Image (cartoon, rainbow, N blue to C red):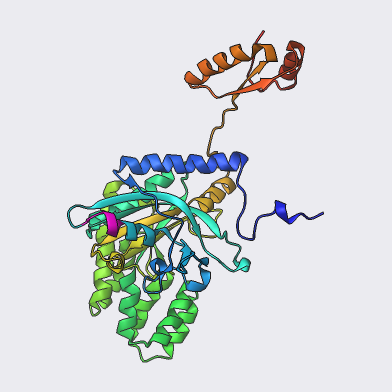
Amino acid sequence: MNDSRLHTPEGVRDIYGKECKNKHFLINTMEETVKRYGYSFIETPSFEFIDIFGSEVGTTPSKELYKFFDREGNTLALRPDMTPSIARAASKFFDPDIKPVRLSYYGNVFVNNNSYQGRLKESTQLGCEFMGDNSIDADSEIIALAVNNLLKVGLADFQISIGHVDIFQGLMQAAKLDEQSENRVRALITNKNFYGVEEFLESKDISADLLEIFTMLGKMYNCPNEWQEFLDKAKNYPQIYNALKYLEDLYDILEIYGVSKYISFELGMVSPYQYYTGILFGGYTYGSGEPIVRGGRYDDLLSYYGKEAPAIGFAIYIDQLLMAMERQKINIFQDENPEVLLYTSNKLKEAVATTNEMRNAGKDVTMVRVSSKEAAVKIQQDYPETCFTILD
């Protein structure tokens, strides 16, 4: 009999046992890491007025939002992305003009993806937002913090791939493409179809130098030295040139942080979130078909909520990270089974006192009542891997 009361809706699931312990270990470890960097924790509601995630923000499309109404008839939405909620709260409670604001959070987000994509519709994010500082130092701190979060939980084989929105935007402006053509190129790049980009652009009236600069979009670079051949050609396009030089300077600072071995550059990177204004980046590792980290600079977003302030941040996708680490067979959490105290009903008072002493001493203890001392000995013999205490 298929009882629907036992099943969850498509795209959501129960998490329990070792997986649940591993997930909370990741979250707790990362929270401790961001605290060391001076980030304060913030919580925002799971649902907001739909305008918080409106099309002007450049976040999740309306058709992918979970929408509903309150009793006053206001349209509400479950948050699909944490950053707009944090930006709204920061605009209300903080003044980044006075001093920079460093905020950290974790929580669940809700996106109504198509089922064929195989993605969770409810997932957990942990992230940081650095507001009120538009410097390259802020950019490098955020990236270094993302790297160190992953290292602290035991992930060793990963890459943070960095791009810059001005490269794509500069190319679009230099090529004088209309909106339809720009959307076409963006879609091709998003799907990593760079041969399609080349074929499409050959039908346009674009100079040979600019076409050659377009070829940067289909390559991955380990360091800025690998794109030096394009710099002379890019000098004729200041927006592109300045973005490339900025990434060079950023790499130099990341070397100072000691994290450059985890850094690569994807100059053709585009994001589904349209609110990014500077660098953007994604984190990748084996065992996950999706990024485990996404982030970037969003200097205009807070103005939507009434506060003019630059900002940069990232989100770590905990469920994707957990899946990747399990597939890589990384031992996430050394779980020690709790000690078990076996007692008969006439020993309840002594059992409670003993377990309280053991717990105060830092031990995990489970109390189990048995019918007799003989039954306790039998249980101890049947489970030799468990540490038992038997009250006489």
The residue closer to the viewer here, 93 or 260, is 93
The verdict on residue 92 being magenta is yes
Q: Is 235 above or below relative to 121?
A: below
Question: Residue 285's spot in the image, x, y percent?
Answer: 49, 54
Q: Is residue 284 left or right of residue 343?
A: left
At x 33%, y 41%, the residue is 35
From the image, which quarter does the C terminus lie in? top right
Q: Nearer the viewer, residue 33 or 259?
A: 33
Q: List the single residue furthest toward the right.
A: 1
Is residue 192 visible to the viewer in this orientation of the structure? no
Of 180 and 64, which appears nearest the observer? Answer: 64
| Magenta-colored span | 90-96
Residue depicted at 79% across the width and 55% down the height: 2
- Residue most toward the top? 392
Residue at 22% of width from left, 56% of height from top? 96
Residue 52 image offset from top left, x and y in percent:
39, 66
Identify the residue at horizontal 65%, vertical 55% (top origin): 8
Say whether residue 326 is magenta. Answer: no
Q: Position of residue 13 (x, y in %)?
A: 62, 53
Residue in the foreground of this view, choosing between 86 and 260: 86
Rendering coords of residue 88 (x, y %): 33, 60
Evaluate whether residue 255 shows in this view.
yes
In the visual, does 361 lie left or right of 253?
right
Does 53 appear above or below 15?
A: below
